[in-house]
Image (spheres, helix red, strand yellow):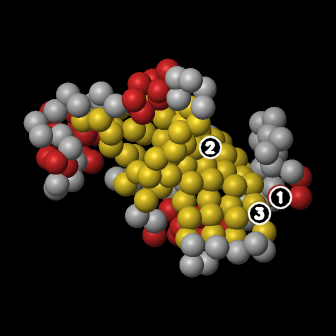
Amino acid sequence: MEKQLFANCGINCAACPADQVTKEGGDLDAIQTAIDLVKSSKVAFLGSNGADGYPNIKAMLELATNGLETMYFSSNTSSRRVADLRANPKACLYYVDTDHFIGLMLVGEIEIVSEQATKDRLWRTGFERYYPLGKTDPDYSILKFTAKWGKLYNGGKYVKCFHIQA
């Protein structure tokens, strides 16, 4: 089933004041701006919670996206980040265009994907530097981020909040 971006979906969302929520069906300009920002970004900032409860943030190279719904990254299976995400999959992504003062925060959850077909599809030349055993390296993991909601900041002109719902 295709996901839609819309407001008033029944989520208790104190993060989205009524005057900042997109209209039913979405604010198409805001949604397109958000999609364009994700497509043009080379880096996304991944925020997660550490075992100590404190937030951690890391710049990640994005491997693939599906609109504003799903983003894929790679990480070392043995890393502290992967251990933290296994314990608490809640995370956020932040994309920014500093030239135009546009920012997008997406909030959702991360799944650690170990399926070989997905790892093969997302493998990139040069990954051998991080995963010397190649595509089947047990230290090669895929992080699949699935967004639940987001906020778009655009040049100080508006803030739009939207929910991503099946």
Please provide percent x and percent y for residue 151: 69, 55
User: Which residue bears the numbered disc 3?
Assistant: 159
Say which residue appears at 70% left-offset and 75% top-offset.
Answer: 155
Image quadrant assignment for residue 91: top right
User: Which residue bears the numbered disc 2?
Assistant: 107
Say which residue appears at 23% left-offset and 31% top-offset.
Answer: 139
Disc 3 to disc 2, how far (Cα)? 15 Å
Tell me the element at label 3: strand
Image quadrant assignment for residue 134: top left
Please provide percent x and percent y for residue 49: 56, 32
Looking at the image, residue 124 lies above or below residue 107: below
Q: Amino acid at mark 1?
A: Gln
Disc 2 to disc 1, how far (Cα)? 16 Å
For marks 3 and 2 on the same chain, the one whose residue lies earlier in the sequence: 2
User: Which residue bears the numbered disc 1?
Assistant: 20
Q: Amino acid at mark 2?
A: Val
Please provide percent x and percent y for residue 82: 40, 30
Confirm or deny contact between disc 1 and disc 3 (CB under 8 A): yes
Disc 1 to disc 3, how far (Cα)? 6 Å
Looking at the image, residue 41 lies above or below residue 106: below
For marks 2 and 1 on the same chain, the one whose residue lies earlier in the sequence: 1
For marks 1 and 3 on the same chain, the one whose residue lies earlier in the sequence: 1
Looking at the image, residue 95 lies above or below residue 84: below
Tell me the element at label 1: helix
Say which residue appears at 76% left-offset and 72% top-offset.
Answer: 156
What is the number of the mark on residue 115? none
